[in-house]
Image (spheres, rainbow, N blue to C red):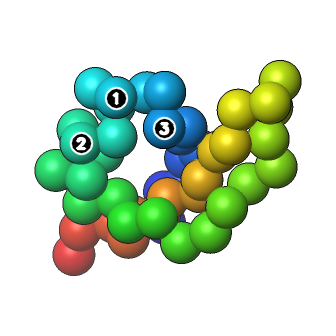
Amino acid sequence: MFALHTSEIMRVALPMHERLGFRRVSSAPAIHGVAYGVSIRAPDG
């Protein structure tokens, strides 16, 4: 399983992560006032 965290200000990264198969599973604590989410992707196979 692969996990990463992204924020809404990462407007290019979010769609790219979705195209790569990542799905948001939860929220993460804000960093410097910016909300983050945690996304995961299971390995192929």
Residue at 79%, 41% (x, y): give it.
30
- Distance, label 3 to label 2, CA atoms, is 11 Å
Q: Residue 27's x, y, as percent?
A: 67, 61
Q: Is residue 24 shown above or below 28?
A: below
**Residue designated by label 3:** 8
**Residue designated by label 2:** 15
Residue at 48%, 38% (x, y): give it.
8
**Residue designated by label 1:** 11
Q: Is residue 28 shown above or below 13?
A: below
Name the residue type under label 2: Pro
Q: Is residue 14 shown above or below 40?
A: above
- Nearer the observer: mark 3 or 2; the answer is 3
Q: Residue 21's x, y, as percent?
A: 24, 60
Residue at 24%, 42% (x, y): give it.
15
Q: Is label 1 in contact with label 3 (beta carbons under 8 Å)?
A: yes
Mark 3 or 2 closer to N-term? 3
